[in-house]
Image (cartoon, rainbow, N blue to C red):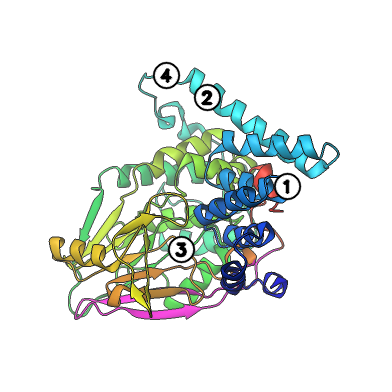
Amino acid sequence: MSYFFSDKDYENAIKYYTEALDLNPQNAIYYSNRSLAYLRTECYGYALADATKALEVDKNYIKGYYRRATSNMALGKFKAALKDYETVVKVRPNDKDARMKYQECNKIVKQKAFERAIASDEKKKSVVDSLDIESMTIEDDYVGPKLEDGKVTVQFMKDLMDWFKDQKKLHRKCAYQILVQVKDVLSKLQSLVEITLKETEKITVCGDTHGQFYDLLNIFELNGLPSETNPYLFNGDFVDRGSFSVEVILTLFGFKLLYPDNFHLLRGNHETDNMNQMYGFEGEVKAKYTAQMFQLFSEVFQWLPLAQCINNKVLVRFMESWPLKQKPEFLRNGRSISKRGVSCQFGPDVTERFLEQNKLDYIVRSHEVKAEGYEVTHSGKCITVFSAPNYCDQMGNKGAYIHLRGSDLKPEFHQFTAVPHPDVKPMAYANTLMQLGMM
């Protein structure tokens, strides 16, 4: 079974450890190893359950504490994680890795406590109020793209993508201009955006991009640049994980400004402060720009819509909930705790009832890695699309996007593979604890 880990085939690792546990349910090592496989596939709820089970079987099995701490960290349960790291350090006082993780986790717990202590109920002022963009000077030696009379143009977007492709930084004045303008555009939108496609029109729906800028460029290469006749919808999780999140989000925001009625962005769970602090976007913005700019990004994210309805028939939504699949021996119905440890899972009966009540044909969601880049479940009523191929440079999955045409709204799936990117590893700007890896 270790072969599947070395081959990054975590799904089969889970399968065979499950079979092993059916034969030997009192083996702490099997639970711990399956926990690691769940961690690698971001099934943090299942990983936490397995680590806990390993410790129930053998309370002295030290790796169980590592696994449980890592699972709790991923779920944002910092105090619980700290308790387990503390246990490991007591048992292994000379373990440098364990001590480092304990110190980093302790730092986060103290930081969170400090933030709560200084929190105020007073209405926060917008970062925009403290900016004087007009007085910002673009230095003579800056030869990168600039907004034309303060506006995004087609040529600016082409120049911007080429500039980013060469790993160059957009001038901070231009970045601030984009952020302030896109905040104004987004603030006028409803949480649920409704659009109508004519019979001859189509839209491209993309899933998570997670800071994989060079794969985003590949989508545009394969499917054409956004335009009034080539509209796009990106379904959340633009940032974090991948280390080119600034480039991804500024490109997406630029196209939103250029084609506000034909380029659509929905908010994912990684367009939030807690995720950004852990998984890299905050660190990346601070490294490439300033803490003030991250605060402005944070404000803008709060104005992103949550869902989009196409022709009153197809609902596109990020959805932290997870669809339960049909298995040969039985049909899983209802709701249960999510394998991610947050939100819930739902069965085909829940999907059918929701669609019937809202007179919809089907749902498109994201937020879950799929080996083929997409997956169709619940008799075609629930579709998952994921657009970050070889996620985190380790999953080996394909990416995908979907074409929907106004004539019949029948989904057409298009797959693609990862393209090379500069030698900057994923999570390069993430919280130190997340960079230390999983034991």
Q: Which residues are magenta?
A: 394-422
Numbered disc 4: secondary structure: loop
Numbered disc 3: secondary structure: loop
Question: What is the quadrant of residue 290 in the picture?
Answer: top right
Q: Would you name the residue on which mark 1 appears? A: 62
Q: How many marks?
A: 4
Question: What is the quadrant of residue 390 in the picture?
Answer: bottom right
C-alpha span from label 2 to label 4? 10 Å
Quarter of the image where the N terminus is located: bottom right
Residue occupying image coordinates x 61% and y 26%: 110
Which percent across, then down, holds residue 35? 60, 58
Looking at the image, tell me whether mark 4 or mark 1 is earlier in sequence order: 1
Q: Would you name the residue on which mark 2 appears? A: 115
Question: What is the quadrant of residue 199 in the picture?
Answer: bottom left
Which percent across, then down, holds residue 356? 15, 65
Looking at the image, tell me whether mark 3 or mark 4 is earlier in sequence order: 4
At label 3, the amino acid type is: Glu
Numbered disc 2: secondary structure: helix
